[in-house]
Amino acid sequence: MVGLALVLRDLVHRDLGAYWALSAILLGSLISAIFSPQALLIASTTAFLLSELSDFAVFAPLRRRGFVVAALVSSTVGLIVDSLVFLWLAFGSLDYLAGQVLGKLYMVLVTILIIVIWERRRGIWAKRPTPL
């Protein structure tokens, strides 16, 4: 779900602006804290917050290069941060880092592909103004 969340947050940033993207990050962190198992509460919430903020920081300057490039690069940074932080805080080990990153990257690629196809079919892939 992390790959999906990162790309969807990029969509919010692109279409609604930074305020709504940051609001989504805070709401997502709260939801993560509420629904995480007690044993994983700190690892899950911290990983979500840091990965989304990393994604946000990378997406913002890249979005003028196009959504696909910005979303792919920022989501990749975010999913690596998410995997590193979660695995280290939850288990004190990075043994499963490659699998975590690869699984999340697959989801990012599938999500971006679906968004591109959806927007092209709806005829909204043309350049549009992007809110700050």
Image: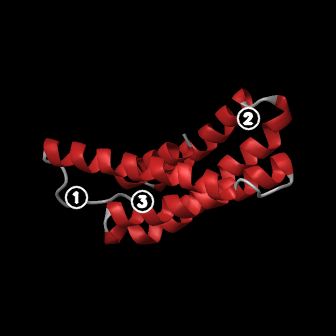
Label 2 vs label 1: CA separation? 35 Å
Pointer 3 or 1: first along the chain? 3
Task: Characterize the local packing of mark 2: few (<14), some (14-19) or many (20 or more) Cα atoms within 10 angstroms.
Answer: some
Question: Would residue 98 appear left or right of 74 to someone viewing this image?
Answer: right
* Residue 118 place in picture, x, y as percent: 23, 42
Q: Amino acid at mark 1?
A: Arg
Question: Would residue 121 appear left or right of 32 to someone viewing this image?
Answer: left
Q: Amino acid at mark 2?
A: Ala
**Residue placed under numbered mark 2 in the picture:** 33
* Residue 90 place in picture, x, y as percent: 82, 46
**Residue placed under numbered mark 3 in the picture:** 71
> Is residue 53 or residue 44 the one in the foreground?
44
Q: Amino acid at mark 3?
A: Ala
Q: In the rendered picture of this protein, how many numbered marks are placed on residues?
A: 3
Label 2 vs label 3: CA separation? 25 Å
Callout 1: SS: loop
**Where the N terminus falls, by quadrant?**
top right
Pointer 2 or 1: first along the chain? 2
Label 3 vs label 1: CA separation? 16 Å
Dot in front, 3 or 1: 3
Task: Characterize the local packing of mark 1: few (<14), some (14-19) or many (20 or more) Cα atoms within 10 angstroms.
Answer: few
Callout 2: SS: helix
Location of residue 118 with respect to 50 vertically, above or below: above
Q: Are marks 2 and 3 in contact (CB under 8 Å)?
A: no
Q: Residue visible at 34% across and 50% down? A: 15
Question: Would residue 69 appear left or right of 80 to someone viewing this image?
Answer: left
Q: Residue visible at 46% across and 47% down? A: 107
Q: Is residue 51 visible?
A: no
* Residue 28 place in picture, x, y as percent: 61, 39
How has the structure been colored for display?
secondary structure
The label number, if any, that marks residue 128 in the structure image: 1
Q: Are marks 3 and 1 in contact (CB under 8 Å)?
A: no
